[in-house]
Every structure is written in structure tokens, then in C-alpha cells.
């Protein structure tokens, strides 16, 4: 699937609240690259150190973009469900556009695993997320 094909999936398969991430496709290939907007609605509030994208938004974006990347690698959308998501937060991700770089760790007939690198608007690696999915059509 091309970048345009993947972009067309977004309104059709994503829940309305997930669409609020404003996911955009940068590149599809062996590594797939996406962005999401870590703006005011995605920033945690309270306490010192404000202006940091919350972990829930990062995790949702990693999960969502992994499904889109799997669609590219499969050549079609395959219905799947998340069976595990592990996020390692390395440093605060500042408010702004967040980039996700996704590579397949495994993509079999029944299950798939992705590795997601999350880069903040400052270009620094902020998190590494591993997502595991069970295909529902398999």
C-alpha cells in the first residue's frame, strides 16, 4: 500500500477520539514513518515540567500507527487486536509534532509485533514501544 492508500484508511478504521491525534503518513517502506500532533489536548497538566506529551497519547499513537504500518506490509488492511503494548519512556516528549518510526519485529499469519521509536519535536528519542497484535482473519 502507498502513503495515499494508508492515509485513506485513517478515517475509516480509527475511532473518532483516536483521529484527534491527527496522524499523518510521512513514508511507508521497510520502516514506516508517521507523525501525530502532540498539541494542547495531548499535553499533561499539573505540576512542574508542563508542555510534555502524555504517555497515553504516545501509546495510542504507537498502537494506531503500528496497525497502519502492518497494513502497508500486508498490502491490505487486516483486522487485528492489540494483545500487548510495552512502552519505555526515555525522556519527556515536548509538546509539538511527534514522529513515530515503525519497523516489523515479526509479521506472521496469526500475529505481528512492531517496534516503534518515538521522537519528540526536539528530534530526541523519547520512547520505545513494542506492540503485539493478533490478526482476527487468520
Image: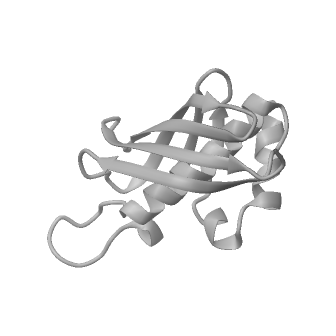
Query: Can residue 38 be seen here?
Result: no
Q: Position of residue 48 (x, y in %)?
A: 14, 70
Indicate whether 44 appears above or below 67: below
**Relative horizontal placement of residue 16, taking residue 49 as reference (left or right):** right
Query: Can residue 104 be seen here?
Result: yes
User: Residue at 25% across / 44% down in the picture?
Assistant: 90
Q: Position of residue 47 (x, y in %)?
A: 17, 76
**Relative horizontal placement of residue 76, taking residue 113 as reference (left or right):** right
**Relative horizontal placement of residue 119, taking residue 47 as reference (left or right):** right
Q: Nearer the viewer, residue 137 or 6?
A: 137
Which residue of the protein is positioned furthest toward the left in this rendering?
48
Rendered image quadrant of residue 20? bottom right
User: Residue at 43% across / 44% down in the picture?
Assistant: 129
| Colour setup of the view | one colour
Quadrant location of the C terminus in the rendered image: top right
Rendered image quadrant of residue 14? bottom right
How many numbered discs sit on the rendered protein?
A: 0
User: Residue at 52% across / 46% down in the picture?
Assistant: 131
Q: Position of residue 6 (x, y in %)?
A: 77, 41
Q: Where is residue 26 in the image (x, y as percent from the top left)?
A: 63, 34
Q: Which of 14 and 131 is in front in this view?
A: 131
Quadrant location of the N terminus in the rendered image: top right
User: Residue at 78% across / 53% down in the picture?
Assistant: 136
Rendered image quadrant of residue 7? top right
Which residue of the protein is positioned furthest toward the top in this rendering?
30
Amino acid at each position: 500500500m502507498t502513503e495515499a492508500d494508508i492515509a485513506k484508511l485513517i478515517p475509516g478504521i480509527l475511532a473518532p477520539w483516536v483521529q484527534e491525534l491527527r496522524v499523518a503518513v510521512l513514508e511507508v517502506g521497510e520502516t514506516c514513518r508517521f507523525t501525530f500532533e502532540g498539541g494542547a489536548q495531548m499535553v499533561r497538566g499539573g505540576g512542574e515540567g508542563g508542555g510534555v506529551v502524555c504517555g497515553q497519547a504516545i501509546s495510542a499513537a504507537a498502537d494506531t500507527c503500528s496497525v497502519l504500518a502492518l497494513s502497508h506490509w500486508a498490502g491490505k488492511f487486516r483486522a487485528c487486536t492489540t494483545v500487548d503494548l510495552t512502552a519505555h519512556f526515555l525522556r519527556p516528549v515536548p509538546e509539538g509534532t511527534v514522529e513515530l518510526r515503525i519497523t516489523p519485529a515479526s509479521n506472521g499469519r496469526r500475529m505481528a509485533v512492531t517496534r516503534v521509536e518515538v521522537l519528540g519535536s526536539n528530534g530526541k528519542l523519547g520512547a520505545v514501544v513494542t506492540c503485539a497484535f493478533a490478526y482476527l482473519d487468520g
